[in-house]
Amino acid sequence: MAPSEYFILILFIALGLFSLVAAIWNIDWYFQTDGARMFVQRLGRNGARVFYILLGLALIACGVAGFVYW
């Protein structure tokens, strides 16, 4: 596996962890960004938190699967 592929997989895991931590700790500035504000308006704050927890878990799973199956 090339170094750039390792970087991408590590980036997936890092971004997944960031999304997971921001959603669990309910970080205000994270949910006030333009991208997250759309989900907050449609799903409510708790719904957006659940969405970002699932998104974080999916990103982490993709990164780990890339390391395991590559």
Image (cartoon, rainbow, N blue to C red):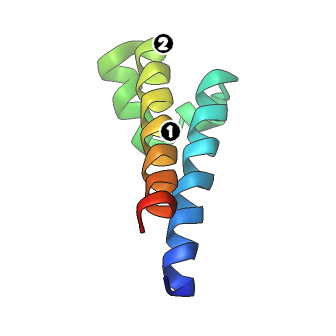
In this view of the protein, which residue sits in the foreground, 5 or 30? 5
* Percent position of residue 14, x then y: 62, 54
Question: Where 33 falls versus 40 (above or below)?
Answer: below
- Residue type at tag 1: Gly
In this view of the protein, which residue sits in the foreground, 8 or 30? 8
Instruction: Give the class, few, some or many, for how many residues have Cα within 10 Å of label 2's Cα (few <14, many ≥20).
Output: few
Question: Where 6 falls versus 41 (above or below)?
Answer: below
The CA span between labels 2 and 1 is 15 Å
* Percent position of residue 59, x then y: 46, 47
Question: Where 8 falls versus 69 (above or below)?
Answer: below
* Percent position of residue 29, x then y: 64, 36
Mark closer to the chain start, 2 or 1: 2
**Which residue appears at 57% of the width and 85% of the height?**
3
Instruction: Give the class, few, some or many, for how many residues have Cα within 10 Å of label 1's Cα (few <14, many ≥20).
Output: many
Horizontal placement of 61 versus 27: left or right?
A: left
**Quarter of the figure with residue 27:** top right
The residue furthest bottom is 2
Q: Which mark is residue 56?
A: 1
**Which residue appears at 42% of the width and 69% of the height?**
70
**Which residue appears at 65% of the width and 28% of the height?**
28
Q: Tag 1, which secondary structure? A: helix
Which residue carries the number 2 mark? 46
- Residue type at tag 2: Asn
In this view of the protein, which residue sits in the foreground, 23 or 62? 62
The residue furthest left is 42
**Quarter of the figure with residue 17:** top right
